Image (cartoon, coloured by chain):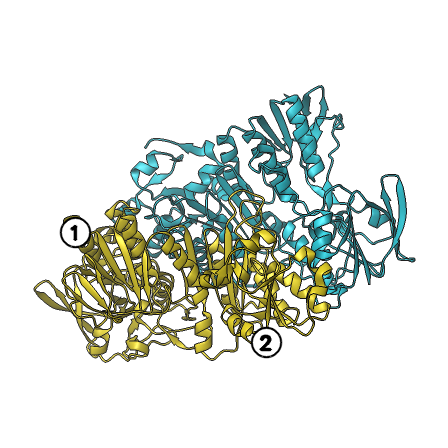
Chain colours: A cyan, B yellow
């Protein structure tokens, strides 16, 4: 058996090494257009600041090491330029040399390439993208030689913000421009607001809801007319499947040009398979087509396609999409659908937020964890979750991702038994609390109002009642709110009006929920502000006033 | 409705506060024998060393704060001394005062008390247990006044070792005596060996497989005759349900004296419920009766019994048992069944170990994570998991606990999509790898031999083949092993004998697995040493020799 694999990074290399473990006799050829195979693409931004100090650390394997360990024929700087599906052969270009290589099975793992936005002047040599070590070397050589002071990052997705952080850590003055209304578009607006707060605290300049239109002589013009001076530009506005070769070969493409494969990674060409960022996958929650550019699914797919080629029963079950980013002192992560995606998919959904501690508050160093759950309010199906905080975000989102993959429901979340000791967690983990809160809403014990509904509710006759202590209230509260601290509430019910609908708030939503239950049972009409003042003040800082 | 709750910590207080949120009118009385309610019992050991500096931090709520916030009638230093089930009333003793209180519903949350082993002289005033703040105050007062230099901890479970660590941090010379063959009996022997390594590194003295038999004039005598001098003793040999009151009232008891309840927490007495460490629960994996003394289930049960009393449909689904401990620089955690428990339960099981990094190896600060999975080799049902390492153990065990609760199978583990960025994880997480490795065994691609089987296998004609590099091998290897580095293996096959069965090993089991696959396909008879040299050398350090 002779297998040719096009693409020598995550998906392609996982396929090659697994195939060798399954078949010692197979001839396995890996073609990689660039000079490096199996490099640490997720690590590239950290080399910019020197946080990863050694370039060699990024180069995990070499053709020689792969030959010795796996008997792979790895050909770097070898571009597949044509697939002849009927003759089952690939045309390869290496420098001036062009030749054909036959295959019994062909695996395409072309990945995705940076999308280049239509900005005039963008071909300048101080404009960069970051996809591989060659790109990184270009950036580092430029930085060494030109000593840029100012950098502009266009695109505030995960990689754009990682680049922004690392350029800042390197000492540059960094501005981020993002077309969407907020940074990290995979997150919802109120969660992203916390990330924006951290970036501003770290002295980055953020310009959201804006595109760049031209670049000339060190000046970027934005669509609203403002001009910014910069010494270099990083383009990070997303990726698109690298499928020029596949298209030319007559391989069927789908969503946004991604390669269409069946559940066994088979394209429409016989014995031609595809995996990784270049293929269309099934979003497991909606069942819809999706493009998901993440290392974990790519690695899994690569391994699975080797199993399929070797005759093992493997099926691509699709992906839910789980991602995380560390930005200075903050971590933000997401799994499954965001609220925006649930809405776009036409799903009936409810949202709850929970703020807790990453570990027991009485043990030193506890920090706040903000979690959001998106779920079906009738069935309890979990659509997605997001988290932002300094510590312990990864593990909560990992558990929730596991819950989604396992089709657990909202009612199952309180049942989860997590590791608990004071340095690690809390006896009722924020993930358990998401379940309790969502169940309270589903069972009618609590009615939530979301941050984006507050303004109109207050305009429509609701009165905001803040049940925090007087010092907390004086330190900052929403204008025209009433303050009755929770411990005083039972004694001061006579100050409230049963004809007046109330919205209760506190710092996190926990005390206000207790107030909501108390008031409801005394005959008041009341809703709880989900996420409470803590969340609202992050996304609407202008609405906050101080004093009493 | 009048509800009396006996026990004002985790389960009891969760029941009281939830009940208030559901029923503003109910009369809720909480009886607590001790002076403190709702204290942070899991935090007590950390106050010994000063890691938790403020005693007040441990006292989360007071009767006054609970009155103000939840309108609870909390009566501390009030011991329920008799239950009159037919008249539905409780006899209460507070100081000299004794009175009856009637109830519509009664909730018992008595907890568990330290088991006192039969050691003569143990009533001395420098022998302590640690269950509550009163015990802690006694220990601290003794330490302040007597300035002990040497401490002996009897019992190396989670709390015993936390106490040992904190006494050591306080500057004492600490010896730990454990009757079981290894510390942390909930973990299996080879996982506990790593913890023992850390404790020895931190200069603690460990004496396992031994009981203390007497204590007199500052000297402890062990069963093997040796005597140890100590200034104080901490007894931490486990707990037993505190059910004297329940027994006297005619409430049926089960396993080791635990209170028997149905799935709605009802005892055999009408309108008398019980929750927390004192009740017998269903071990969810085996379906067997179990006593589980952990904060998370106790809190959940407390909340659920309030729901039951308020008429909501809540069922105790049982517990799987998840626990974690930080000991100096190391973390150890477990969920579900250990190998020993699976064996005792008569289950057919297989074990695999995986060693990976907590985060990407090319990003600074990566440390080793050792995970163990216990599963059914036919169905793939996951019975349990354990983890030991410096970082990232909590999140792996949390995900695995979620997988067990969600009844995921081994084949589902590779499908889990975890948060991955270089500071947080690896593209193929150790949890994914557990699934891959277990599947390889289930599908016949790999045959494992366990650490405890190695010696007899080598005695029965197997040859050990170490495929690490020559420097690694020289740094320490198992005696009489052959060394052929993996990259050289294909070229040196002629040095091996097809009639000779081999066991392959490396550092973690990954390279040896590649070697196993290679050799199998070349017609050799070969098994992989699960956990490889890295694990074996921890538990059998005497078997390690250096040089070539």
Q: Name the quadrant containing residue B212.
A: bottom left
Total residue callouts: 2
Position of B182 relative to A76 (above/below): below
Q: Farthest residue to the left: give it.
A: B96
Q: Where is residue A403 in the image (x, y as percent from the top left)?
A: 53, 60
Position of A256 relative to A138 (above/below): below
Tag 2 subunit: B
Tag 1 subunit: B
Is residue A443 in view from this perspective?
no
Which of the image's four quarters has the C terminus of chain B?
bottom right
Residue displayed at 61% across by 33% down: A48
Which of the image's four quarters has the N terminus of chain B?
bottom left
Quick check: A546 left or right of B106?
A: right
SS category of the residue bearing label 2: loop
Residue displayed at 25% across by 71% down: B223
Q: Distance between the residues labelled 2 and 1?
A: 56 Å
| Badge number at residue B378 | 2
Mark 2, residues whose alpha carbon is within 10 Å: few (<14), some, or many (≥20)?
Answer: few
Position of A442 relative to B68 (above/below): below
Residue displayed at 33% across by 31% down: A547
| Badge number at residue B141 | 1
Q: Where is residue A95 in the image (x, y as percent from the top left)?
A: 85, 39
Q: Farthest residue to the front: give it.
A: B548
Quick check: B382 left or right of A104?
A: left
Q: Where is residue A427 in the image (x, y as percent from the top left)?
A: 37, 57
Mark 1, residues whose alpha carbon is within 10 Å: few (<14), some, or many (≥20)?
Answer: few
Q: Where is residue A532 in the image (x, y as percent from the top left)?
A: 42, 44
């Amino acid at each position: 058996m002779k297998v040719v694999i096009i693409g020598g990074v995550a998906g392609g290399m996982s396929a090659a090494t697994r195939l060798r473990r399954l078949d010692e006799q197979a001839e396995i050829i890996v073609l990689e257009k660039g000079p490096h195979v199996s490099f640490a693409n997720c690590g590239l931004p950290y080399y910019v600041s020197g946080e990863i100090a050694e370039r060699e650390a990024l180069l995990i394997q070499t053709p020689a090491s792969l030959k010795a360990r796996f008997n792979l024929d790895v050909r770097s700087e070898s571009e597949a330029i044509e697939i002849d599906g009927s003759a089952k052969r690939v045309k390869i270009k290496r420098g001036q040399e062009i030749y054909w290589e036959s295959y019994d099975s062909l695996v395409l793992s072309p990945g995705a390439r940076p999308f280049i936005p239509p900005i005039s002047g963008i071909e300048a040599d101080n404009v960069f993208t970051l996809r591989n070590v060659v790109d990184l070397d270009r950036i580092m050589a430029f930085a060494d030689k030109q000593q840029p002071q100012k950098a502009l990052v266009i695109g505030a997705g995960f990689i754009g913000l990682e680049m922004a952080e690392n350029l800042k850590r390197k000492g540059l003055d960094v501005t981020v421009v993002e077309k969407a209304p907020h940074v990290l578009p995979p997150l919802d607006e109120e969660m992203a607001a916390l990330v924006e707060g951290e970036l501003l605290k770290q002295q980055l300049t953020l310009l959201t809801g804006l595109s760049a239109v031209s670049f000339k002589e060190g000046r970027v013009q934005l669509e609203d007319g403002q001009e910014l001076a910069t010494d270099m530009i990083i383009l990070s506005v997303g990726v698109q499947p690298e499928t020029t070769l596949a298209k030319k070969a007559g391989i069927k493409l789908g969503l946004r040009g991604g390669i269409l494969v069946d559940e066994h990674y088979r394209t429409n060409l016989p014995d031609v398979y595809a995996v990784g960022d270049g293929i269309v996958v099934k979003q497991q929650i909606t069942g819809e087509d999706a493009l998901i550019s993440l290392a974990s699914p790519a690695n899994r797919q690569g391994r699975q396609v080797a199993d399929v080629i070797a005759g093992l029963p493997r099926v691509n079950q699709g992906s839910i999409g789980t991602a995380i980013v560390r930005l200075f002192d903050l971590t933000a992560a997401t799994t499954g659908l965001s609220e925006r995606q649930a809405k776009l998919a036409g799903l009936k959904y409810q949202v709850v937020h929970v703020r807790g501690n990453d570990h027991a508050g009485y043990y030193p160093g506890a920090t706040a964890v903000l979690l959001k759950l998106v779920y079906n309010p009738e069935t309890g199906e979990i659509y997605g979750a997001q988290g932002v905080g300094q510590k312990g975000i990864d593990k909560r989102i990992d558990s929730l991702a596991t819950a989604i993959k396992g089709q657990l429901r909202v009612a199952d979340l309180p049942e989860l038994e997590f590791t608990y000791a004071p340095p690690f967690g809390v006896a009722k983990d924020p993930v358990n609390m998401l379940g309790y809160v969502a169940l309270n809403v589903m069972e009618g014990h609590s009615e939530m109002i979301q941050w984006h509904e507050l303004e109109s509710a207050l305009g429509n006759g609701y009165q905001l009642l803040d049940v925090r202590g007087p010092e907390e209230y004086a330190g900052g509260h929403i204008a025209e709110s009433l303050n009755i601290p929770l411990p005083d509430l039972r004694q001061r019910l006579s100050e409230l009006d049963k004809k007046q609908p109330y919205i209760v708030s506190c710092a996190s939503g926990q005390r206000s929920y207790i107030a909501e239950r108390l008031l409801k049972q005394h005959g008041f009409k009341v809703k709880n502000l989900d996420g409470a003042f803590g969340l609202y003040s992050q996304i609407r800082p202008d609405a906050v006033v101080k004093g009493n």
